Image (spheres, rainbow, N blue to C red):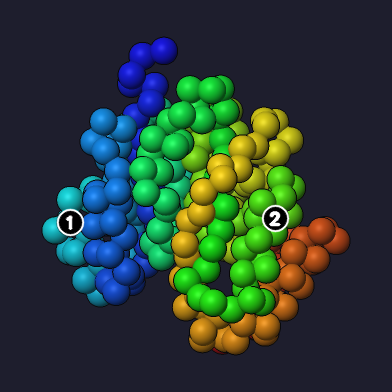
């Protein structure tokens, strides 16, 4: 296969993330290789702080999008030059040499997958849920684990469902499981517990569990967001 088939576009959706954007961009540059990373795309949903300025100062390409994570992810995918898309949260740090780890999987014919998850905490409660990410079931997946997928495979889907204000990662990955083998790399990303720190570990995880259950029982994107808005976003 041509070397161009292994070029990665990193896609990071953001909204008012001036505290995190510099850290993640510097980390990605330090712990990857220009041999594989063709671009880092920061997809801004209308930040009113210094997110865009800081992203540009740190070498990222900023693309403006309508607000909404699904819309931002789709905008990034449509704009990407790379043959491999790597969707990443701004507060999630992938393992060292993550790019070569991803490329090695694609070379083996694995078109989509993610890493294991660790939280930046010693909490046994949260680390139990991180441990569950080694189980290869769609219910154990989430956007915090990051996601790599070949652009060719992504283009066969309808992309992220923009009706979902929340749960867009889970909904997309659930569809992916139906059409492709899904690979879990035995290396960890480390993600921030900032939301848990704000809401409380047990409380927030409970609400996430309810959202999973509501989705399983057939609740649509509007009902999921209504619950999130009332219980989590307040």
Q: Residue at x 54, y 23 (%)?
A: 108
Where is residue 154? Give x, y as percent: 53, 33
- 130 to the left or right of 89: right
Q: Nearer the viewer, residue 173 or 202?
A: 202
Residue bearing mark 2: 140
Tell which of 202 and 82 is nearer to you.
Answer: 202
Q: Is residue 90 above or below residue 113?
A: below
Looking at the figure, which quarter contains the C terminus? Answer: bottom right
| Location of residue 46 in the rendering, given as x and y in whole percent from the top left corner | 33, 65
Residue 132 coordinates in the image, percent (x, y): 69, 59
For the residue carrying disc 2, how many other residues have a C-alpha within 10 Å: few (<14), some (14-19), or many (20+)? some
Q: Is residue 111 visible?
A: yes
Q: Nearer the viewer, mark 1 or mark 2?
A: 2
Judging depth in this view, the residue of 162 and 12 nearest the camera is 12
Residue 172 horizontal/vertical position (percent): 62, 46
Residue 44 left/right relative to 118:
left
| Residue 181 placement, left or right of 115 | right
Mark 1 residue crowding within 10 angstroms, few (<14) / some (14–19) / many (20+): some
Helix, strand or loop for disc 2 = helix
* Mark 1 residue element: loop
Comes first in the chain, label 1 or label 2: 1
Measure the C-alpha gap from mark 1 to mark 2. 33 Å
Q: Which residue is found at the position 40% from the left and 43% from the top? A: 98
109 above or below 204?
above
The residue that mark 1 highlights is 58
Which residue appears at 54% of the width and 63% of the height?
Answer: 118
Seen in the picture, residue 83 relative to 163 is either above or below; the reply is: above
The answer to the question of whether label 1 and label 2 lie on touching residues, with beta carbons closer than 8 A, is: no
What residue is shown at x 66% (from left), y 51% (from top)? 134
Which residue is outermost to the right? 217
In the image, farthest residue toward the top:
1
Query: Does the rendering let one see residue 170?
Result: no
């Amino acid at each position: 296969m041509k070397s161009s088939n292994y070029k990665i576009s990193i896609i990071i959706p953001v909204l008012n993330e001036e505290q995190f954007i510099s850290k993640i961009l510097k980390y990605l540059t330090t712990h990857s290789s220009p041999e594989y990373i063709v671009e880092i795309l920061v997809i801004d949903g209308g930040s009113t702080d210094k997110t865009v300025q800081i992203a540009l100062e740190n070498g990222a390409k900023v693309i403006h999008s309508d607000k909404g994570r699904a819309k931002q992810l789709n905008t990034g995918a449509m704009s990407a030059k790379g043959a491999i898309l790597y969707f990443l949260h701004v507060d999630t740090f992938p393992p060292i040499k993550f790019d070569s780890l991803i490329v090695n999987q694609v070379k083996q014919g694995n078109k989509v997958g993610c890493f294991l998850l660790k939280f930046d905490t010693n909490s046994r409660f949260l680390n139990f849920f991180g441990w569950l990410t080694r189980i290869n079931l769609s219910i154990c997946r989430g956007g915090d684990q990051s996601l790599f997928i070949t652009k060719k495979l992504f283009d066969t889907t309808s992309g992220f469902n923009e009706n979902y204000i929340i749960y867009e990662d889970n909904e997309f990955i659930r569809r992916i499981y139906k059409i492709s083998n899904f690979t879990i790399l035995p290396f960890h990303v480390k993600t921030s517990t900032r939301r848990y720190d704000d809401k409380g570990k047990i409380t927030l995880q409970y609400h996430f569990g309810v959202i999973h259950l509501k989705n399983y029982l057939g609740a649509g994107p509007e009902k999921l967001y209504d619950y999130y808005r009332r219980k989590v976003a307040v």
